[in-house]
Image (cartoon, grey):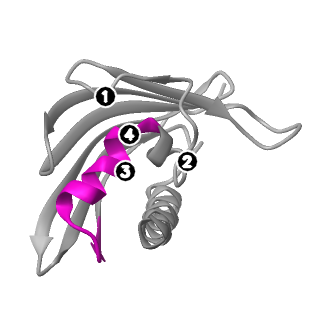
Amino acid sequence: MNEHIAVHNTFVVERIYKASPSRVFATWEDPKLKELWFSKADEFDFRVGGKEMSQGGPPGGPIFTFDATYQDIVPNERIVYSYTLDMDKNRMSISVTTVEFKPEGTGTKLIFTEQGVFLDGHDTPEQREHGTTIMLDNLGKQLENL
């Protein structure tokens, strides 16, 4: 029998972008802009109660499913969503994420806070924080190109 474990963790990643809060926020609310730095959504309904879902993975590898529900949206200021992440039929984690957009000079300070429970050793908080860091760096590169 496999041992079932739950590891709880909160991490915060901050970035400063040379773009206004409204411009950075737009990269989260517009599916065409978001897919430039995040996975392309199979379903995208950016409103409180709306869903975002995407599936994908490496060729011949496992299928990862990101399934989110938007819990709170304050335009140009805050997004809160809850999501599950599955690898094939295994639930890897359940999280609540808050993304804050704060004016910083002529740019934006983005504060990304994730509170998660990582299940049965399928993922770790350190791996998730590392992936989030890469994701937000990719967002910064896309903002430079917009």
CB atoms at circles 3 and 4 under 8 Å apart?
yes
Q: Is mark 4 on a helix, strand or loop?
A: loop
Tag shown at residue 27? 3
Residue 112: image location, x then y, percent = 27, 58
Earlier sequence position, callout 1 versus callout 4: 4
| Number of other residues with Cα within 10 Å of mark 4, as a class: few under 14, some 14 to 19, many 20 or more | few
Q: Is residue 80 visible?
A: yes
Q: Quadrant of residue 117?
A: top left
Q: Which of marks 3 and 2 precedes in the sequence?
A: 3
- Quick one: 88 or 9, which is closer to the camera? 88
Q: Check disc 1 and report the residue beneath it.
A: 46
Q: Identify which residue, 7 or 54, lies in the foreground.
A: 54
Q: What residue type is labelled 4?
A: Asp
Q: Name the residue under label 4.
A: 30
Q: Residue furthest top?
A: 49
According to the picture, the residue beneath numbered tag 2 turns out to be 123
Q: Which of marks 4 and 2 is in front?
A: 4
Stretch in magenta: 13-31
- Under mark 3, the amino acid is Thr
Q: For the point 37% across and 50% down, which residue is it?
A: 27
Q: Quadrant of residue 129?
A: bottom left
Q: How far, Cα to Cα, is label 2 from label 3?
A: 27 Å
